[in-house]
Image: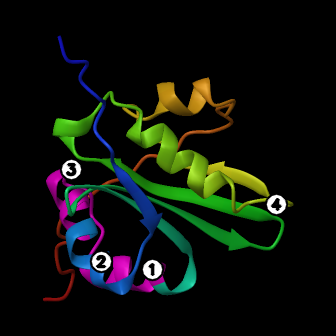
Amino acid sequence: MSVSQPPAYVYRPMTADDVGNAHGLSVALKWPHRLEDWAMLQRVAQGFVAEDNGRLIGSSFACHQGEFSTIGLVIVSDDYQGKGIGRRLMDLALATVAPRTAILNATLAGAPLYEKMGFKAFGEIQQRQGQAPSLLP
């Protein structure tokens, strides 16, 4: 009887070559981030990706801003949910934060993971998406 080994996902810093595939993760979730938003964040923040056999399956960022670091774009592809990938990506981002205080904006789907990691809710943000109508005649 053979013992099956868990998949060996690769975790590494995000590069400019990853931006297109990472953007695809947010598009799949219908998040409003544009390709140029991802490219800018990749240049100014510390990003991480998870891969499975060369396929980008997850991302996270830590954007350092004075006394705080914002953790964001923590995304794991739907078919890889529940395998600890999001937690590992969070750990990588959080490892870059000290001595700053980490903050994040969480979706309802991500909130349980963040609560398990010690984050506490302190406010609520409501986001609206869509095309704004022109007010010009």
Cα distance in 3D space between marks 4 and 3: 29 Å
- Residue shown at 13%/89% (left/top)? 137
- Find residue 100 and report its horizontal and vertical position in percent: 82, 60
Alpha carbon of mark 2 to alpha carbon of mark 4: how far?
26 Å
Structural crowding at the residue carrying mark 3, measured as other residues with C-alpha within 10 Å and reported as few (<14), some (14–19) or many (≥20)? few
Residue at label 3? 29
Color style of the picture: rainbow
Kindly identify which residue carries mark 1: 42
In magenta, the rendered stretch is 23-42
Please report the residue visible at 33 percent of the width from the left and 48 percent of the height from the top.
9
- Residue 92: percent from the left, percent from the top? 58, 54
Which of the labelled discs sits on residue 100, or is there none? Answer: 4
Amino acid residing under circle 3: Leu
The tag earlier along the polypeptide, 2 or 1, is: 2
Q: CA distance from mark 3 to mark 2?
A: 16 Å
92 over 109 or under it: above or below:
below
Label 1 element class = helix
